[in-house]
Amino acid sequence: MELLQFAIKAKFSGFFRQQRAQRIFFLVLGLIAAGFYSWMFAFMMEQAQESDMAVTTTKVLSYANLLLLALTIMRGFFPAYIPKSDLIPRIYPVKAGTKFMVETATELTSPYYFVLLCFLGLLFTFSADYTLVHLVQSLLVILTAQATRSSIQLFIERRIKWLGKDFFTAATAAAGFVAIQVLYPMYEPAATAAYLGVHAGALLFLVAANYFLEQAAYEPKQKVVHYSHNARRSLGWRLFNNHKLAKQMSMFALVLKVLILAADAIVYSKKGIHLYDKNMALWLFMGPLILYTYVFNNIWGFYRNLWLTTERTSGRLLDFLKSSLLPLRIPLLIDATIVAIYLAFFNHGEAVFIVSMYLVSVLVLTPIGIVSSFVAPKTVRGGVMSFSAKTSYLYTFLSMFIAGLLFLPILHPVLYLLYPLLVGLVLFALVAVLREYTAYKYKIFGALYKVEG
């Protein structure tokens, strides 16, 4: 218990130790969003209760639970991948159950979950239709999402003993969870308190699966460098293939994009509509934004040796620009291929807009990524001990905001005039930053090479 209290206290005290103003700003922004969405869902339930709408109160509650489920899982993978915390190394004489409990509790000790609790509390206050049973169920949904995300991260980051008894126990517990979900999905509102027992039982199965999977995951996946003696292999390919973390995160981003586009393609094939017709936020996955928020808003953080080599050999700005574009070539080519295949088979009607938007996204996001790498470099420690994103939060949201502006021509074609304006602005910012490189290079070196301790 003392270890648990110490870990939670240390995690809590570390929230605002660095970048205090920025983190307070995002916390306040999250609380404002919690208030707005709680009011919105309360209003929707009231309207559904008073009118003969196709969307019932039950449906609104289901949407709220699905939103909680999706956000909690996705926050670990978008806009940047956040590795699972390994707070207590296994060489320490701490029992497996204690280690699992402490690490789970510290993961739940987060401003994100605080914002979610505020959302649920305000929704419970605003809406008479959102009962105590629904509140408890929503809490179970959040815990289920956290356990699901943790299990996915274990598969991604750790080696698994596939033939061990721990893995078979985890698989059995996971099968029990899935069986219950088929009959009583977690996101559907519980009609009575008795259903909470079913959902709680399903959560216990999932937590047990996560616990035994943790025991079956015996060590982190090791970095393997694949050297090639083929002179025809480009430097861009070598940079992509030999940097395991950057390649891993780029592939996560691309897989996530494929899943979103595949879901849209399936819905379009069956119903003749696109997912982004219902949720405009999905337009963000049409462009290459996710690659930048994962990796390329912090090029020098990932490829710091490339920066140092360029600095020590020539130090010319043109060489820095060429070097910063080298790691982007292969992932961007794969991303463009995915979009081209999607357009060829499932979205002919929006092809002109999507191609135009994609090309301008590259022209806009690439300078932003270079500026971010010079102005706000972040140390990339390949490990599972990282509690934060690998790129600058400020430039991540700036990239998302500017990428969102590129979708305004959907409202009216005259808004295509924004494209040259945005490209001009980011190029002006890039030139301004490069002119001050002499001052920034000391900051880059300090951030990338003097961060120990």
Image (spheres, rainbow, N blue to C red):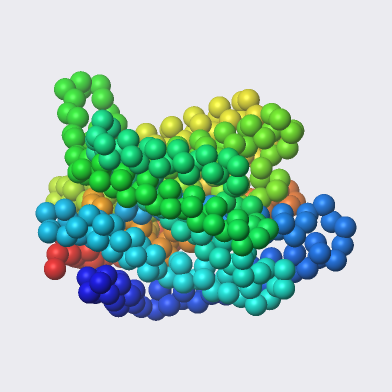
Considering only vertical position in the picture, is 70 above or below 256?
below
Residue appearing at x 26%, y 53% in the figure? 384
Instruction: Give residue 122's position: percent from left, percent from top.
Output: 61, 75
Q: How many marks?
A: 0
- Asked if residue 203 can be seen in this view, the reply is yes
Q: Out of 193 and 71, give the one closest to the viewer.
A: 193
Side of 234 where 276 appears, left or right:
right
- Asked if residue 153 can be seen in this view, the reply is no
Q: Out of 27 and 184, give the one closest to the viewer.
A: 184
Q: Quadrant of the N terminus?
A: bottom left
Q: Out of 329 and 126, give the one closest to the viewer.
A: 126
Hey, which quadrant is residue 163 in on the image? top left
Q: Quadrant of the C terminus?
A: bottom left
Side of 205 where 183 appears, left or right:
right
Instruction: Give residue 367's position: percent from left, percent from top.
Output: 42, 52
Side of 54 where 436 appears, left or right:
left
Residue appearing at x 46%, y 47% in the figure? 290
Residue appearing at x 62%, y 37% in the figure? 264
Considering only vertical position in the picture, is 437 above or below 148?
below
In this view, which residue lies farthest toward the right? 52
Instruction: Give residue 337's position: percent from left, percent from top.
Output: 49, 29
Side of 374 where 76 appears, left or right:
right
Residue appearing at x 17%, y 64% in the figure? 451
